[in-house]
Structure formats: C-alpha cells, structure tokens
Image: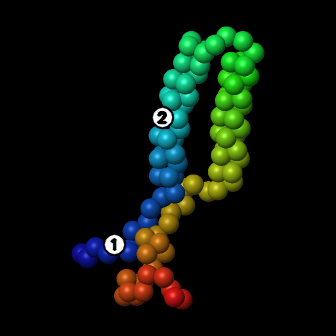
Amino acid sequence: MSFEFLSLSIPLWWLLVFYGIYLVFFFLYTGFNLYHLLRFGTYGIGLYAITALFLGGTIMLVALSFTLLSPFDWMTGVSVSSIFGDSKNTQFLPGF
C-alpha cells in the first residue's frame, strides 16, 4: 500500500474553522475595547459617537464577510495536487 501526498484532498470547511477561531478572538478583543471605552472614556457625545462608529464598523465587516462567504460550497475538497501542481516540475513560477 503506497501513500501519495499529492492524492490527498483538503476540505474547504477547515478554512471556516480557522476563520471562526479568528472571529472568537476578534469579538473578545472588541468586548475588551468596548468595556474600556465605556468605563474609562470621557463621557459625552464623542464617546458615544466613537462607540457607535466602532460597533457599526464591526457589524458591517461581519455582515460583509458573511455575504461574501455564504455562496460557496464549503463541503467540497481541494486536492493537494491542484495546489502544488506536478511534483516533477521544478519551476516555481510557470511562464517566467
């Protein structure tokens, strides 16, 4: 029984797992920032404007990423041979 590295297939949903881990840390950092903005910021309309701008930007980025990522079929796989190409080809940038 032989094992060929180029015959492996990597499912695309693994990219969503890494993106989900990134989002967890992003939301933890967002909560940390919002707490410090509201707790230690100078009170007034400026504080609430900056907080609303920060939350609006965060919501916009999450909604945009969901809109752009949702049409893809994340259950398909990508073969390693399509990423690395032919193993006998030593030229890294074809055409150059």
Tell whether 44 sits left or right of 8: right
Please tell me which residue is depicted at 51% across the width and 88% down the height of the picture.
Answer: 96
Q: Nearer the viewer, residue 11 or 33?
A: 33
Residue 78 in the figure: left or right of residue 71: left
Position above or below: 73 against 25: below
Residue drawn 44% across and 66% down? 9
Q: Residue 29's mark?
A: none
Q: Residue at x 67, y 28 (%)?
A: 55
Q: Quadrant of the N terminus?
A: bottom left
Question: Tag 1: residue type?
Answer: Phe
The residue pinned by badge 1 equals 5
| Residue for badge 2 | 25
User: Where's residue 81, x and y in %?
Assistant: 44, 75
Amino acid carrying mark 2 in the image: Phe
Q: Nearer the viewer, residue 25 or 81?
A: 25
Task: Examine the image and state in which quarter residue 53 appears.
Answer: top right
- 48 sits to left or right of 34: right
Left or right? Give the position of 64 relative to 73.
right
